[in-house]
Image (cartoon, grey):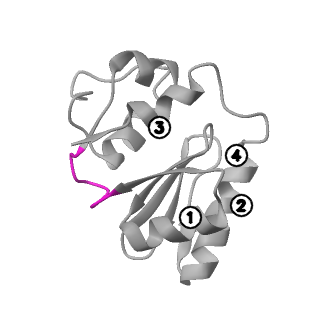
Amino acid sequence: MIDLDPALRPWVDGAPAAWDVREAVRVAEDIAAVRSVGVDWEPGDEEWVHVVDERILAQISKFFPLALVLGDDLAEVFRSRHAEVTTVVITAADAEELRASPDLLQRTVLSAGWSDEFNPEQFSALDLFLESV
């Protein structure tokens, strides 16, 4: 199980002033260009920007410098090109391998709360994306 608490805790009082949706999209576009893949994001509704090929390779928050990244090799690209982004390695976007304290989720990435189906003790990056839409 991957504990997101250490990644979320720094942003309980808000994200760095330099981080916003434009920065999240810029990082996603840069990573996508390096890997010759695409970016998937719908302005307005979606709180996460995806770097994609036929699957989600990375999920970047538009509110916090946080990326959930498929595999160590792509994580290394993030870390070398965008050290300001906290990078959490996942095995798949739909792998229920993440957990986080409800208080930290509420105060950061899921400020509007979540559905009864969402379990803070075991969820996937895709679950996090769906709950934030």
Q: Residue at x 78, y 34 (%)?
A: 17
Which three-letter amino acid code belongs to the residue tagged 3?
Answer: Ala
Q: Residue 41: say if magenta.
A: no
Q: Residue at x 64, y 56 (%)?
A: 83
Residue 50 or residue 80, whichever sits in front:
80
Residue 28 or residue 82, whichever sits in front:
82
Measure how far apart labels 2 and 1 are at the Cα level.
Answer: 12 Å
Q: Circle 4: is it few (<14), some (14-19), or many (20+) Cα within 10 Å?
A: some
Q: Earlier in the sequence, mark 2 or mark 1?
A: 2
Residue under circle 2? 26
Which three-letter amino acid code belongs to the residue tagged 2?
Answer: Arg
Residue under circle 1? 78
Outermost bottom residue: 36
Q: Circle 1: is it few (<14), some (14-19), or many (20+) Cα within 10 Å?
A: many
Residue under circle 3? 7
Asked if the residue at tag 1 contacts the one at tag 2, i.e. Cβ–Cβ closer than 8 Å, the answer is no
Expressed as whole percent of the image width and height from the top left, the position of residue 47 reads 55, 41
Measure how far apart labels 2 and 3 are at the Cα level.
Answer: 21 Å
Magenta span = 90-97
Q: Secondary structure at mark 2?
A: helix
- Does residue 58 appear in this view? yes
